[in-house]
Image: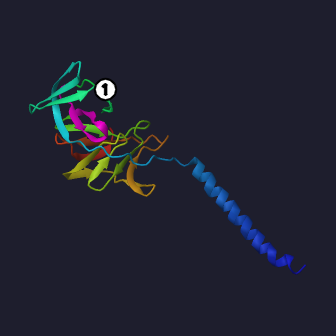
Amino acid sequence: MAVVAPMRPILRLTAAMLTLALAVQGCALFARHYPNPPLPLQPTTVGVIAETTQDASGYHAHLVDGRVIDLPQNGTFKLIGGGLEDKGTLLLAGTAGGGFETPLSSLGNGCWEAYVGPSSNPIVWDMGDSILFMTGIELSKAADYQVSPAPHLVDGRQAWTVPEGDGAPPMSFCANDRGEIEWGKPLQ
């Protein structure tokens, strides 16, 4: 019987550790999980659209500075939320991954908006000198970049997230006509 008495504290400790482990695991089941950052798509072409045209070969964005950007309809080319875009839209395009194009809508005053939304873009990463969106688009920060609130730590990376169910607004980010992020703030 002398053997049984010393085992009780060990059994109690084991039971307490098992209960704690199950509680932590249970909380993890209900915690929101975010995806890892996508492979970055860094635009090599940035410009404001003057007009767009379409023919058998695809779309053609005529930029205000005179450049014409051909956007093919076929192949691995990735259209991110766009197609035949309106005058005044900021075009971001590049050749990574077979080519990509995405438009940013004008907010006026030299600002084009990219934002994090509740379902399609639940997270945006702060990469130090740049901002990486869920679409894969990575834009450099402008020299006078400002943001409020600051990003928080999510799975070991700095990011902004849209909290589920608490009514907090998503973040809004403003890009200038060079495709640099000038500011970030909660969407009004």
> Is 103 inside the magenta-drawn segment?
yes
138 left or right, relative to 20: left
The crowding category of the residue bearing disc 1, from other C-alpha atoms within 10 Å (few below 14, some 14 to 19, many at least 20), is: few
Tell me the element at label 1.
loop
Question: Which residue is depicted at the point 23% across and 22% down?
Answer: 57
Question: Which residue is depicted at the point 38% across and 51% down?
Answer: 159
- Residue marked by disc 1: 74
Q: Amino acid at mark 1?
A: Asn
Magenta part of the chain? 86-106
Spot occupied by residue 130 in the image (x, y as percentages of width and height): 27, 51
Q: Residue furthest bottom?
A: 2
Spot occupied by residue 80 in the image (x, y as percentages of width and height): 32, 33
In which quadrant will I find the N terminus? bottom right
Question: Which residue is depicted at the point 76% across and 73% down?
Answer: 10
Spot occupied by residue 172 in the image (x, y as percentages of width and height): 31, 41
* Front in this rendered view, residue 186 or 49: 49
